[in-house]
Image (cartoon, rainbow, N blue to C red):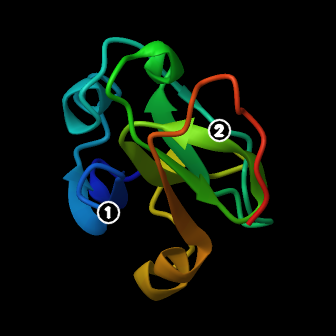
């Protein structure tokens, strides 16, 4: 397993996707996405890429949302796109490129929490 690698940070507050370094320690995710508890989506593509988000972000006031093609629910707050090696379960760099990710993310703004389903 690699120690650290680049991942993509999706920031719906700034409407920006950027490359950030992930050191491979899951505890670093808390500071990267500004949360106390996180969870990952199922893979949104057939290569194992997923989005890690604040697990209780949907309940926070003043929240911003985004969606990603291949996953039909809106996501709350900041998220990182990270890959998974299906054979070992280890984290790995995402397969999706920044260019393709930008094409597949939609900014949803101040989506009310009760509106949990969306389509790209």
Placement of 94 over or under 92, stated as above or below: below
Q: Residue at x 74, y 41 (%)?
A: 42
Q: Secondary structure at mark 1?
A: loop
Mark earlier in primary sequence (2, 1): 1
Q: Residue at x 23, y 44 (%)?
A: 23
In-image side of 105 versus 85 (left or right) = left
Q: Which mark is residue 48?
A: none
Q: Residue at x 31, y 40 (%)?
A: 24
Q: Secondary structure at mark 2?
A: loop
- In this view, the residue in front, 70 or 89, is 70
Placement of 5 over or under 87, stated as above or below: below
Q: Which mark is residue 15?
A: 1
Q: Position of residue 115 (x, y in %)?
A: 70, 32
Q: Position of residue 60 (x, y in %)?
A: 40, 16
Q: Position of residue 21 (x, y in %)?
A: 21, 56
Crowdedness near tag 1: few (<14), some (14–19) or many (≥20) residues, C-alpha within 10 Å: some
Crowdedness near tag 2: few (<14), some (14–19) or many (≥20) residues, C-alpha within 10 Å: few
In-image side of 95 versus 34 (left or right) = right
- In this view, the residue in front, 88 or 51, is 51
In-image side of 27 versus 120 (left or right) = left
Q: Which residue is mark 2?
A: 89
Q: Residue furthest bottom?
A: 99
Q: Decide if residue 119 is in sight here.
A: yes
Q: Position of residue 78 (x, y in %)?
A: 36, 42
Q: Are marks 2 and 1 in contact (CB under 8 Å)?
A: no
Please count the marks in the image: 2
Q: Quadrant of the C terminus?
A: bottom right
In-image side of 66 versus 21 (left or right) = right
Quadrant in which residue 83 is drawn: bottom right
């Amino acid at each position: 397993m690699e120690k650290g690698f680049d991942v993509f940070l999706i920031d719906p507050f700034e409407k920006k996707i950027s490359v950030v370094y992930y050191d491979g320690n899951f505890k670093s995710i808390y500071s990267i996405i500004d949360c106390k508890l996180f969870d990952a989506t199922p893979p949104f593509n057939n290569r194992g890429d997923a989005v890690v988000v604040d697990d209780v972000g949907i309940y926070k006031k003043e929240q911003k949302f985004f969606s990603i093609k291949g996953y039909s629910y809106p996501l709350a707050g900041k998220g990182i796109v990270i890959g998974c090696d299906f054979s070992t379960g280890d984290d790995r760099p995402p397969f999706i490129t920044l260019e393709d990710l930008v094409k597949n993310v939609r900014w949803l703004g101040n989506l009310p929490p009760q509106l949990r389903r969306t389509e790209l």
